[in-house]
Amino acid sequence: MCGIVAYLGEKQAYPILINGLRRLEYRGYDSAGVALLADDQLTIYKCQGKVSDLEAHINGRSTVANLGIGHTRWATHGPPNDVNAHPHQGTSGDLALIHNGIIENYAPIKEELVHRGHVFKSDTDTEVLVHLIDDIQRSEGVDLAEAVRLALANVVGAYAIVVIDRKNPDVMVAARKSSPLVIGLGEGEFFCASDATPIVEHTKNVVYMEDGEIAVLDRRQGLKIRNIKNQVKTPFIQELELHLEALEKGGYDHFMLKEIHEQSRSIRDSMRGRLNLAKGEVVLGGIKDYEQKFVNAKRILIVGCGTSWHAGMVGEYLFEEFARIPVEVEYASEFRYRNPVVNEDDIVIAISQSGETADTLAAIELAKGRGATIIGICNVVGSSIARVTHAGSYTHAGPEIGVASTKAFTAQVTVLTLMALMIGQKKGTLIGGNFHRLLNELDAIPDKVQKVLKTEAQIKYIADIYKDAPNALYLGRGYTFPVALEGALKLKEISYIHAEGYPAAEMKHGPIALIDDSMPVFVIATKGASYEKVVSNIQEVKARKGRIIAIVTEGDTVVKDLADHVIEIPETADPLVPLLSVVPLQLISYHIAVMRGCNVDQPRNLAKSVTVE
Ligand code: G6P
């Protein structure tokens, strides 16, 4: 939540900041702002709304500066308005600060500062921090970096910050704890950002800051990093593997549509070098050293949030079926706030697209503290979760920018499938023919996804019929129950239609009361173990005049006779059906949202990377 970007160098800062903010807008879009420093003058422009609103607000005014910071906000403390927009300033007016995170003990600090004569303008926790740094700088007579260090020693919470000082145009100071921050090192220039996307077109050399580190970026002295205890740290410079094209819409109207259409490729990328048909094996290099631990595991816990939690539910079915290991899937936010039984024999799989979700990170810390082995499944390389886990496998889906997750879900499910297959084979619970049949089926999935995408015109037609429905129900059974949950989440997130996902048989215990002739019921009714049962559930809906939109296996005739609409997907093994059946549901949500005039890539109130609890 909240995106921050900063530039110090010879070039004009403003275009770099605006471009960077556009890339970071997925992190929040309640307000945006920049602070520019030139000729000993700090100029701040900020306003409620999106980055485009900020540009309109600035239009025509001077932006000349080669040092600047920028912020796009997802509101926590204080409503989204002009005053609460970042950057914030302290009493002296010399400092400008941007912040991603939450200062939890802002209230007592604020009280003390008010007592000392500071006057606050906003409702934000962030303003407390800049006043504190300002106060320390002046009362202790220390430079900016030291004032930041001393201030942060008093702060409880999460932060990625960048601060600049009107009196020192050669320096910017950045710090992080529990919120991501990347430094880019160019020729005589520095960048800071919440992720590498604003940096990639300027330099490939980056340093991912560690928790508790404070970086001083100085035109003359270069980059120096210390920790909060004032110990010098050696920056670890890495080369970015990100490519600019991956961050563009590539001719599609929205990132979400592009990402839905990328799934054939992204699933293939998730399997690349891991699935070897010729040798008949699955190799996940990242968890190789932990194979035996998996084989001996008495239990697997899977934690995640949102769509990642849904992928985890598919993982539960996969691991239990292939590897015969009991699995519990938990919302990270629930897991961390009870007193879960976790011990050294447990394996915890943490799933996160961004690798930054605060609740998932906290759940990992808790489980790690109790001795469990933590395996990560993340998309963003170098992200916090990828770094705190013992081992893991990246999903390699490429950057996902649309706030509603699509290709990350199928990539997560692909990696979970590979993991469960690998462990099942090692353990001997998934033998011979079945293992090889599944490998072949998995290898065929990308081509089948491509085929599913060809149903888009038909899906658009269905979307047009149901776009004004106030409610929708999604039903699935077995492997497709999590898909029903995910389908409902997609519709809610981007079209603001109330939708619920249910296990098809559970419908009788409540939701059936909602069914009438205006209720669209999306049912995944593919051929497989539960097919007949789901057909009975469809009959139950029809008897109450519900409108059935069924996802069926190619060539199905039974459901075709019952349903109002059918969308055919190619036949595959039961455990792989989620990878195909979720695609039409993603497309339906997308087209309904577009037809309703919703902002598909930036739905209201949401953010892609939830770095607050
Ligand atoms: C937010 C996003 C979702 C995502 C969830 C978990 O709610 O809008 O798309 O599924 O966070 O994020 P993660 O990055 O941990 O997968």
Image (tube, rainbow, N blue to C red):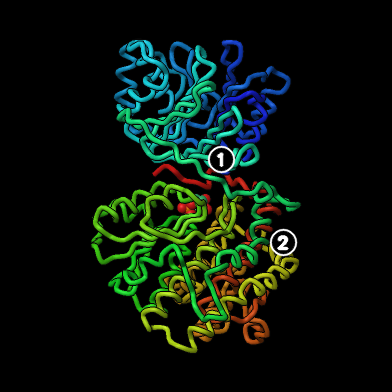
Residue 57 image position (x, y, % from top left): 67, 24
Rendered-image quadrant of the C terminus = top left
What amino acid does circle 1 point to?
Asn
What amino acid does circle 2 point to?
Asp
What residue sits right under mark 1 in the picture? 205
Q: Is residue 110 left or right of residue 54?
A: left
Residue 263 image position (x, y, % from top left): 63, 64
Q: Is residue 154 above or below residue 299?
A: above
What residue sits right under mark 2 in the picture? 464
Packing grade of label 2 (10 A; few <14, some 14-19, many >=20) is some
Residue 343 image position (x, y, % from top left): 23, 62
- Please report the residue visible at 35 percent of the width from the left and 59 percent of the height from the top: 374
User: Which residue occupies the foreground of this view, 177 or 202?
Assistant: 202
- Mark 1 CB near ligand 1 (8 Å cut): no
Q: Is residue 438 left or right of residue 203?
A: left
Q: Could you say whether the residue bearing mark 1 is in a helix, strand or loop?
A: strand
- Give the mark nearest the N terminus, 2 or 1: 1
User: Which residue occupies the foreground of this view, 48 or 259?
Assistant: 259
- Please report the residue visible at 43 percent of the width from the left and 13 percent of the height from the top: 91
The answer to the question of whether label 2 and label 1 lie on touching residues, with beta carbons closer than 8 A, is: no
Packing grade of label 1 (10 A; few <14, some 14-19, many >=20) is some
- Please report the residue visible at 59 percent of the width from the left and 76 percent of the height from the top: 443
Residue 519 in sight in this render: no
Q: Splitting the image into 4 quarters, where does residue 146 fall?
A: top left
